[in-house]
Image: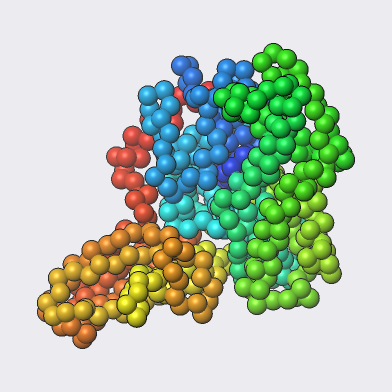
Amino acid sequence: MSQREDGEDYCVGIDLGTINTALAFMDGRGDLTVDKDPDGSMTVPTSVLFTDMGKIVGSKAETKARTEGYGNFLSGFKRQMGTKYTRTVMNSTYTPTEMSALVLRKMLLRFEENHGVMPTKAVLCVPGDYGIPERQATIQAGRIAGLEAIELINEPTAACIAYCKENKFRNGNIIIFDLGGGTFDASVVNVNNNRFKVLSNEGSRSLGGKDWNLHLANIIQRKVIDAYGMTQKEADRNMKMRQDIIVEARRVKELLTVRNRVTDTVDINGTPVTYTIRREEFEDATYELNMRLITMMMNALRSAGLREKDISRVVMTGGESQISAMMRYVDDALPTVRTDIFDPFTSMAKGAALYADAVFSDGDVIVEPVLSKTLGIKAGVDGNETIYNIVFRSTPLPMAPNALFRPKRDDQETLELEVYETKANPGTYYTSLPYGFMIRKFEIPLTGKIYRGRTKINVHFTVDLNGLVQMFVDCNGEVTEFDMSNGMTMLPTQIMQSKKKVMNIL
């Protein structure tokens, strides 16, 4: 068991980001510290390159891929967490869970190199918009990486904890505007000393800085094609050029936050090609993306039942929060509210470490989370199939909701049940099937004597503080538990097999 100098187990907080990953911890003196590379870097790129010698994780993976090609390079897999997506690299197939475990393992190994011990307890950050499958997959990734005790915290909540601790903010309502590399969340959090009560969350697991990068890369590519004299068809076939331009776009985006225009050179087939891009071009191309963020932020405010005058401040965080014009759009939407940009790259890891100190040790942080997605069951209404919403997002956790069903015929042997996640707001009891995401489909055996319309079939859910759900069905006094993880639950033997895949990290 890993221990600090004071004999207590190390408890760490890890922000597993789409673009970068960071780890923070409370040291033996009670100081909050972000773990660093030997070169002083506090973040590790969430990227993996597979080689004959082993797996390279982080900045060296990106550097080597730029010179040797991207065929065995993995990144951006956070967006596929909780899905059936796989990628085959060098004759081995990896799930997003295993890809994430490689990065988490790298962080734990780096910590061990720095401090001589391997952490076994951690709080892992997840987007507030994550549902059941994504949360379960994140926990499995932690177990594969070698963690024994794992708790989850929503990224904006973690950022809020770090902000309040550092800025001595004690009481009030804060909007956390969290734009990461691949995801976005807007959370409203009520702060009362060390108690953090989440009131609402809006977000998207498929909207983040990568989307701004792609828009900027498209602008750069058009300019390069024109300057080089290349046809669009030739450009489409040149995958290395496209990847290099995407990497270039990330750097140019940062420059455009402080400059009105950027002139740079890209190497195309050994020929340097110079281009110039103006900030105005970038802002025009991404205006719709910006408006989507503002809409979600205002929806979060309304879902919390608050108005502008009830908000003490907006805290912008996440690695992409410094995108050109972003603060201006937020200020325009909430002109009377103070807006701060706070620690874009490590705030989540810091907040997770503070929460880890409370969960696993004697820290004083209390978090009151909410359900991220509405849970419903497919039902027939007036001859049409729809989703009947049982428990709504933004409901405080933990909880134990129930739903009562009755059989359609005497001696019915099974009950077919399809459980869905939706984004329905409280009071919206029905959602069309295309707007829901099916978690699992069950064929539940019914026990005892079954009478049409009379026998009670009680479906009971329990949702814990991590947002993970268990389902129990009670029919005639016999209770059966059902797996709600969308196939993400791994047996111990499967975890051991996956652990072998995350060995030999360089």
Residue 422, compared with residue 36, is above or below; it is below
- Across and down, in percent, residue 170 comes to 75, 67
Can you see residue 67? yes
Residue 343, compared with residue 304, is above or below; it is above
- Tell me what residue is drawn at x 60 percent, y 46 percent: 182
- Across and down, in percent, residue 98 comes to 44, 37
- Across and down, in percent, residue 283 comes to 78, 47
- Across and down, in percent, residue 379 comes to 34, 73
- Tell me what residue is drawn at x 64 percent, y 48 percent: 208
Would you identify the image quadrant in which residue 89 lies?
A: top left
**What is the total number of numbered labels drawn onto the structure image?**
0
Would you identify the image quadrant in which residue 478 lies?
A: bottom left
Camera-nearest residue between 42 and 374: 374
Camera-nearest residue between 314 and 212: 212
Camera-nearest residue between 111 and 224: 224
Specify the farthest residue to the right. Answer: 260
Judge left or right: residue 485 versus residue 429. Answer: left
Judge left or right: residue 452 versus residue 430. Answer: left
